Amino acid sequence: MWKITFGVASGIVLAGIIIIFFFVFLMSAASRNSDEAINHALQEYQSQIRQINASHPSAASISPSLRHYPSSLPIEPVPLTFPDRAFLIPKSRDELVRENSKKAYVKVRKEVADFKSQYKKPPECLDMQTSAIRMYCANAYIKAREAYEASNK
């Protein structure tokens, strides 16, 4: 029995070690590929900037009327105002469901507490001895609840 247990345990440990090494290898390969891709994109971007700078006319060829334009314009800082909601992170579906469930739960608890504070049992229901009296009390409760819901809607 202990041989089977030891064999299964060592198999699980060996599988865990293999999985860990696989993920380490996979992550290192992914980071190498992403570094190469970033460097390649940066080199392309820099070569495009050099081509654009080479193709544009120099400052000497700017028309004389534009040369006398003031280089520093009075710029007044404009305060940036954003509504507070602009910086909120959108909620996930689970968070929205949880929030709505809590609101609905609180609402129902309040309604039930309000109904129970207003509901008075009929005197026959204070001591229910037979099933007929229990049925009568259940029906009286249901009718009172329906009347309460109809009056509050």
Image (cartoon, rainbow, N blue to C red):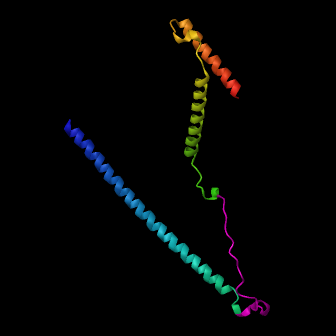
Q: Main secondary structure of the magenta part?
A: loop
Q: Is residue 40 left or right of residue 15?
A: right
Q: Quadrant of the C terminus?
A: top right
Q: Is residue 147 left or right of residue 109?
A: right
Q: Is residue 136 above or below residue 149?
A: above
Q: Is residue 97 left or right of residue 33?
A: right
Between 17 and 87, which is closer to the camera in this rendering? Answer: 87
* Part of the protein shown in magenta: 60-83
The percent position of residue 8, horizontal first and vertical second, equals 27, 42
Q: Is residue 78 magenta?
A: yes
The percent position of residue 79, horizontal first and vertical second, equals 67, 69
Between 131 and 97, which is closer to the camera in this rendering? Answer: 131
At a point 71% along the width and 94% down the height, the residue shown is 60
The percent position of residue 93, horizontal first and vertical second, equals 58, 45
Q: Is residue 56 above or below residue 107?
A: below
The percent position of residue 32, horizontal first and vertical second, equals 44, 68
Count how many numbered circles sit on residues in the image. 0
Looking at the image, which residue sits at the far right?
65
Q: Is residue 9 above or below residue 74?
A: above
At a point 42% along the width and 61% down the height, the residue shown is 27
Q: Is residue 46 magenta?
A: no
Q: Quadrant of the N terminus?
A: top left
At a point 68% along the width and 85% down the height, the residue shown is 55
Looking at the rendering, which quadrant does residue 106 occupy? top right
